[in-house]
Image (tube, rainbow, N blue to C red):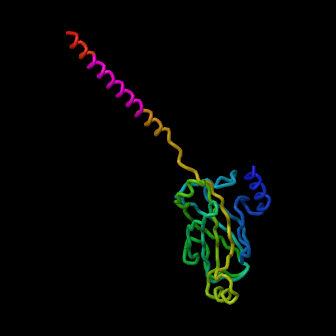
Amino acid sequence: MIRVLYICLSLLIFGSVTNARFSSCSTDGIGELGEISVEGCNKTQYQCEMKIGQTFNVSITFTTKESIKIACAKIEGQAWGKIIPMKKEKICENENSGVKCPLDQGLQFTYQGSAMVPDDKFLEMTEEIDVYWRLMRNDEESKEKRRDAETPPTTEIVCVKIPIEIIFKKKDQSDESDESDESDESDESDEADEADEADEADKGNEAGIE
C-alpha cells in the first residue's frame, strides 16, 4: 500500500518530465532538465526491468544556466541505503556523448551515455536499485570559486533518478525437459537395479532349497 502511494505521489510531482518515473534529483543544478529516455524501458511500468550485468543507454536533454568549460558524468546506484559506484566519465573526451565542450550558457544539449547494472550480490537480496545519473561541471575556474566559498569543487548540472527492478533469468522449458528426462532415466535405472537384486535373491533361495 505504501509503495502504491509513493508511486502515485511521484507521478503527480514529476509529471513534467517526459516519463514520470524518471525524476530530477538535483537541488541546485546549473542546468534545466528536459527530456529523458532510457533504452529498453517499458513505458507502462514504473520501474525499468533489467538484469544484473546488463548495459543500458540513457539520453538526457538539458539547457545550461551558466557557461561550462568541462563537464563529466557520475553514475551511482543506491539500494536500501547502500551506495554502489557504477561509472565516471569525462563527457568532453567521449565522442559518443553528443556534447562538445565548452558549453555556452542558455543552449540546449542532449547527452548520451551508457552504464551497466552493477554485479553486486546485494542486489540479489534487494531486487531493485535507484540509479542516480549526474552531469557535473568540473573545471578549474569552478573549483577555485567554490573552494574560496568552502563548498564542494564540482557543481551539478542536472541529476536524473532512474528506478530499476532487477529481474532474474527464468528457467527455460528445455532445461525443465532435460531435468525431467534425467529423472526418468534415473528412475528406470533404479528399477533395473532392483529387478537384478530380486533375481539374484530368488536364485539364492532356489539354491538353498536344493
Q: Magenta span has 183?
A: yes
- Quarter of the image where one finds residue 132: bottom right
Q: Position of residue 112 (x, y in %)?
A: 61, 68
Q: How many marks?
A: 0
Question: Which quadrant of the rendered structure holds the C terminus?
Answer: top left
Q: Position of residue 172 (x, y in %)?
A: 50, 41
Q: Position of residue 47 (x, y in %)?
A: 66, 55
- Quarter of the image where one finds residue 154: bottom right
Name the residue at the top extreme.
210
Q: Which residue occupies the foreground of this view, 202 or 169?
A: 202
Does 171 sit above or below residue 65?
Answer: above
Name the residue at the right extreme.
12
Q: Which residue occupies the foreground of this view, 101 or 52?
A: 52
Per the picture, the main secondary structure of the magenta-coloured stretch is helix
Name the residue at the front extreme.
208
Does 67 sit above or below residue 207?
Answer: below
- Quarter of the image where one finds residue 204: top left
Q: Tell me: 22 left or right of 86.
A: right
Q: Magenta span has 7?
A: no
x 44%, y 33%: residue: 180
Q: Which residue occupies the foreground of this view, 160 or 59?
A: 160
x 40%, y 34%: residue: 182
x 77%, y 60%: residue: 15
Does 137 sit above or below residue 110?
Answer: below
Q: Position of residue 44 (x, y in %)?
A: 70, 51
Q: Which residues are magenta?
A: 182-201
Does 67 sit above or below residue 55?
Answer: below
